Image (cartoon, rainbow, N blue to C red):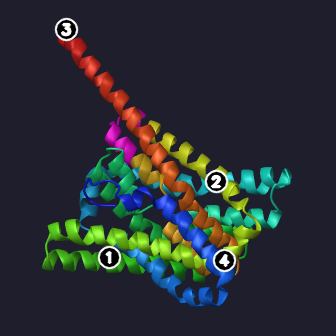
Amino acid sequence: MTNGSAGLGWVEKLLALWIFLCIVIGLGLGRYLPEFSQNLGIGIPIGLFLMIYPAMTKIELGELREALKSRRQVGVIVFFNYAVNPFLLYALGWIFFENILPALGLIAPDTARYLWTGLILLGVAPCIAMVLVWTDLARGNGPLGIVLMAWNSIIQVFTTPFYIALLVGTYIAIDIVQIGQSVFLYLGLPLLFGIITRREVIRRKGREWLNTKLIPRFNTLQLLALLFTMVVMFSLRGGVILDDPNLIWQMAIPVVLFFFLLYNLVYFTTRRMGYNYEDSATMGFHCTGRNFELAIAIALTAFASIPMVAVSTVVGPLIEIPVMLALVWLSLRRRDRILQKERAGKNAQET
């Protein structure tokens, strides 16, 4: 995760492996050292904050003025992220967790609704961190990606509590005040501290030092915080998966379907609108990637009494990372075909 084009480092490339290892460690601690695991619980709020804060240091409010020149692109991601995505994941949850899986006897109705809740939490907020990596790997429009991330970071502060109340509140009694507090603590405050950090570092050290020194270190801090949070979370609540390991594939079905459906819908829609590959791929990733850090934070705080909700949100990144890498590969294949057609057209004109 960088502002430049460094791509994925070895830590990010193997993130799915690290997540799996942290789940195993957490489950082991919870099973064999339960008292030690309970003492680790105090680290969850710190870990959640440090997962989100580093991403916010990439945002400069002044970039929003530049975004006014990209109003159509911003309009596209606002439409898909806030008028389509939450309802698409809600619909997929309704299809699989309210109907198909319970009807086939593959999941208990109560369990299905808790997984449905986790799915909705993954859907209400777009990604504001790893999405820059996917855009970079797919050779997308990096500057446009930063602008879109800035908009998403600010908009979701206000929309997340609304969508959770609207969608989850239809079948589970929720405390909207508590959800609002979670969004403020784990999105609003990191945004504020991130903007202040960026401004002060640039003033004291310069923009180059921020981009080449601080942000790479923050990227590592973010991943370490994510991994630490997962160890703690599974040591405290991982017994849910040990009791029912089928939760992983049950969550994977709608999540994988969502990623492939949405990315291709956004990509081909924007291509039909006349955008080039770089812009279309960028908008596709910014509409597809999910803010699983915020989903985990809300699940751990606002739904603390329902461990299965928190576990379902953690399964999200375990699925998302390999799927997004597959979408990067698919995008690069499309890019190669476009370049081949362009070269063939130039050769035809020259002859």
**Mark 3: which amino acid?**
Thr
Closest to the observer, 263 or 310? 310
Q: Which residue is mark 4?
A: 237
Give the mark toward the camera: 1 or 4: 4
x, y percent for residue 106: 81, 55
**Mark 4: which amino acid?**
Arg
Identify the magenta region: 271-282
Return the residue found at the far front.
32
| Label 3 – label 4 distance at C-alpha | 67 Å
Marks 1 and 4, the one that precedes in the sequence? 1
Characterize the local packing of mark 3: few (<14), some (14-19) or many (20 or more) Cα atoms within 10 angstroms. few
Secondary structure beneath label 3: loop
Q: Quadrant of residue 172?
A: bottom right
Reply yes or no: does residue 180 show up in magenta. Answer: no
Q: Which residue is mark 2?
A: 252
Marks 3 and 4, the one that precedes in the sequence? 4
Secondary structure beneath label 4: helix
Q: Which mark is residue 351?
A: 3
In the figure, 250 relative to 292: above or below? above
In the figure, 331 relative to 120: above or below? above
Closest to the observer, 113 or 175? 113
Marks 2 and 3, the one that precedes in the sequence? 2
On screen, residue 316 versus residue 286, left or right, reads right
x, y percent for residue 148: 35, 57
Q: Point out the image quarter for the C terminus.
A: top left
| Label 1 – label 4 distance at C-alpha | 30 Å
Q: Point out the image quarter for the N terminus.
A: bottom left
Q: Which mark is residue 168?
A: none
**Mark 2: which amino acid?**
Ala
Q: Which mark is residue 194?
A: 1
Residue contact at pointers 2 and 4, CB within 8 angstroms:
no
